[in-house]
């Protein structure tokens, strides 16, 4: 029913270039910095990239350390793409499509990692305030998302910020990618118009399928 069930397995065989974090780590370990200040600036920028939150901080890192970053071919271009994505978050009309798209893009850039089999994801809502009815939809829609995408967990605490005076119907998310205890990357994206009837319809369909599966398993015992 949903392509995301097999998405992870399908992309693991893709041949891609070394990921950004490893390229930056290689520079940290092998580059001869001119002085302590230059090394500290690089370290600060490296941490900004890992956080994946502030596009202006990452752009400053690119501007200040471009000569250093250029020792890794294509690294500046990759970092610039991160800045562009943070400044212009991806927008989708369907949450499942948005999730699988963002996961696919990440895996396309990182599937050559030796530890990719340990990858898991965490999703959270980053809106400061949302109407209570929109948050209620989110709770229904996402509370058991790991039943559909086993490697994905949802931060239920990110729902605790409702404001019934808010007219917002678009929901912004942060999707973080983890390997063991390390955050590899954060991706921001937005789902437009979550007050639409399709959301209720899709949730009803998913709930019905999960319920039927549960009943079948019960009968098999």
Image (tube, rainbow, N blue to C red):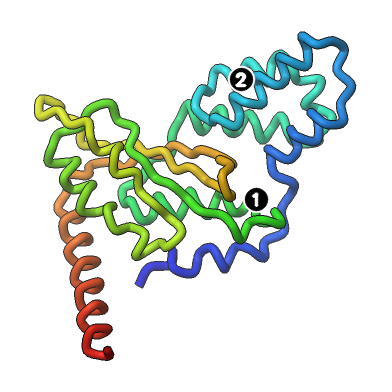
Image coords of residue 170 (percent x, y): 26, 36
Tag 1 residue: 110
How far from the left and from the top, in percent, is residue 117?
61, 61
Quadrant where the image shows the N terminus: bottom left
**Which residue is pictured at 43% across the width and 47% down the height?**
122
Quarter location, residue 77? top right
Residue 64 occupies quadrant: top right
Distance from Cα at disc 1 to Cα at disc 2: 22 Å
Q: Going 26% across and 78% down the picture, which residue do you hit?
A: 213
Report the residue that reaches farthest toward the bottom: 220
Quadrant that contains the C terminus: bottom left
**Is 193 left, or right, of 30 in this rendering?**
left
Q: Residues within 10 Å of mark 1 (few under 14, many from 20)?
A: many
Label ID, residue 146: none
Where 117 sits versus 134, above or below? Answer: below
Quadrant hosting residue 34: top right
Is 131 situated left or right of 39 in this image?
left
At which x and y percent is residue 87?
48, 26
Label 2 neighbour load within 10 Å: few <14, some 14-19, many 20+: many
Q: Mark 2 = which residue? A: 59
Q: Does residue 29 lie above or below 16 as drawn?
A: above
Q: Residue at x 22, y 30 (%)?
A: 161
- Asked if disc 1 and disc 2 are in contact, CB closer than 8 Å, the reply is no
- Which structural element holds mark 1? helix
Query: Considering the numbered disc 2 on the image, is that residue within a helix, a strand or a loop?
Result: helix
Q: Earlier in the sequence, mark 1 or mark 2?
A: 2
Residue 145: x and y in percent read 33, 57
| Residue 149 position (above or below residue 48) | below
Q: Seen in the image, is 204 located left or right of residue 101?
A: left
């Amino acid at each position: 029913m949903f392509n995301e069930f097999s998405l992870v397995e399908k992309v693991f065989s893709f041949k891609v270039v070394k990921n950004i974090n490893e390229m930056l780590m290689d520079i940290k370990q092998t580059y001869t910095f001119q002085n302590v200040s230059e090394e500290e600036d690089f370290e600060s920028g490296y941490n900004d990239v890992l956080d994946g939150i502030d596009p202006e901080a990452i752009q400053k890192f690119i501007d200040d350390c471009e000569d250093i970053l250029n020792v890794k071919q294509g690294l500046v271009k990759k970092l610039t793409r991160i800045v562009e994505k943070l400044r212009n978050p991806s927008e989708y009309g369907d949450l499942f499509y948005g999730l699988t798209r963002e996961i696919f893009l990440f895996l396309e850039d990182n599937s050559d990692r030796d530890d990719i089999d340990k990858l898991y994801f965490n999703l959270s809502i980053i809106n400061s305030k949302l109407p209570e009815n929109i948050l209620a939809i989110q709770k229904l829609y996402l509370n058991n998302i790991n039943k559909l995408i086993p490697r994905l967990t949802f931060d239920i605490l990110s729902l605790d910020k409702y404001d019934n005076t808010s007219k917002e119907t678009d929901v912004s998310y942060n999707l973080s990618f983890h390997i063991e205890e390390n955050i590899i990357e954060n991706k921001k994206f937005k789902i437009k118009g979550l007050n639409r009837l399709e959301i209720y319809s899709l949730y009803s369909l998913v709930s019905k399928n999960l319920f039927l599966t549960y009943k079948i398993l019960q009968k098999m015992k």
